């Protein structure tokens, strides 16, 4: 149990376009989902926390208008990178938990490359 | 500030041997969970083991066990009978259960290589 999927696993896009990444909890209801960014050889950096049916809470320094997060159901959260630029190229990982302080189960990640 | 420190950036071990990864943390909270996550080259984060701070008994999961010393704020991971598939980055993390900052705090990771 506790499987989280993420789609796509990798994406290449042109500068200025928008990219949507989906995160799904496959076998449990996720009250809370988290979005992280990971730079090469570094730890995970939390971008935002989203609770089902409410607005996401963004970490300091993360542009909420650039990284749009929607958590419309207990099994799906999406991250949309709007007007992507090369500096947005990174590895994005989502996680899901039954409640905010419970164990987080991670998706396999999405490699975004912006040309 | 709540922090997690992993003092060993890299470690290596021979297959079938035992290795211990260290982790210390700093928090003023009394109730929290501690985790070890593994990130192999595929980059999928995998939960290795979880420890509730209120439990004195050390958690174990097959070949993986922890040495949880709450007073010392130490949470080391022991891997017994190391296997080639254990090669990965290992991240120590904790999450406070109250205080308004319920976020997973990660250490910088330890890169473990299991040699044949």
Image (cartoon, coloured by chain):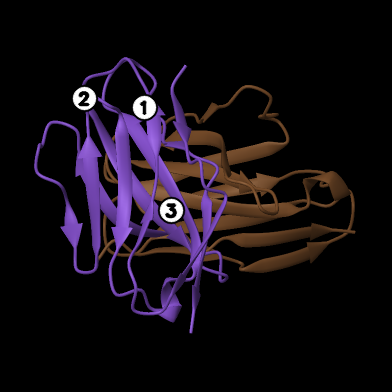
Q: Chain of mark 2?
A: B
* Structural distance between the alpha carbons of marks 1 and 3: 21 Å
Residue at position x 27%, y 54% in the image: B49
Output the letter for the chain in purple. B
Q: How many discs mark residues in the rendered view?
A: 3
Taking depth in this image into account, of A115 and A74 the one nearest to the observer is A115
Tell me what residue is drawn at x 76 percent, y 43 percent.
A82
Q: CA distance from mark 3 to mark 2?
A: 29 Å
Chain A display color: brown
SS category of the residue bearing label 2: loop
Confirm whether residue A105 shows in the render. Answer: no
Residue that lies at the very extreme toward the bottom in this rendered image: B116
**Residues beneath discs 1 and 3 located on the same chain:** no
Q: Is residue A77 above or below residue B43?
A: above
Residue denoted by label 1? B102
Which of label 2 and label 1 is nearer to you? 2
Q: Nearer the viewer, residue A23 or A100?
A: A100
Query: What residue is shown with label 2?
Result: B31
* Residue at 49% over, 29% down: A55
Residue placed under numbered mark 3 in the picture:
A76
User: Would you identify the image quadrant in which residue A1 lies?
Assistant: bottom left
Nearer mark to the viewer, of 3 and 2: 2
């Amino acid at each position: 149990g506790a499987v989280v999927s993420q789609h796509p696993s990798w994406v290449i896009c042109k500068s200025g376009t928008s990219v949507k990444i989906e995160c799904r909890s496959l076998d449990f209801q996720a009250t809370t989902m988290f979005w992280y960014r990971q730079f090469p050889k570094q730890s995970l950096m939390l971008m935002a926390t989203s609770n089902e049916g409410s607005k996401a809470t963004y970490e300091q320094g993360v542009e909420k208008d650039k990284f749009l997060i929607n958590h419309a159901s207990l099994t799906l959260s999406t991250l949309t990178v709007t007007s992507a630029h090369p500096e947005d190229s990174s590895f994005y990982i989502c996680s899901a938990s039954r409640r905010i302080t419970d164990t987080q189960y991670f998706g396999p990640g999405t490699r975004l490359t912006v040309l | 500030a709540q922090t997690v420190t992993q003092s060993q950036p890299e470690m290596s071990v021979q297959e079938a041997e035992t290795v211990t990864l260290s982790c210390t943390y700093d928090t003023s909270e009394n109730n929290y969970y501690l985790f070890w996550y593994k990130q192999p080259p595929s980059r999928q984060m995998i939960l290795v083991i979880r420890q509730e701070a209120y439990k004195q008994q050390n958690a174990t999961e097959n070949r993986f066990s922890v040495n949880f010393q709450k007073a010392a704020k130490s949470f080391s991971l022991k891997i017994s009978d190391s296997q080639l598939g254990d090669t990965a980055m290992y991240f120590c993390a904790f999450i406070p259960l109250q205080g308004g900052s319920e976020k997973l705090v990660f250490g910088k990771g330890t890169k473990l290589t299991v040699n044949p």
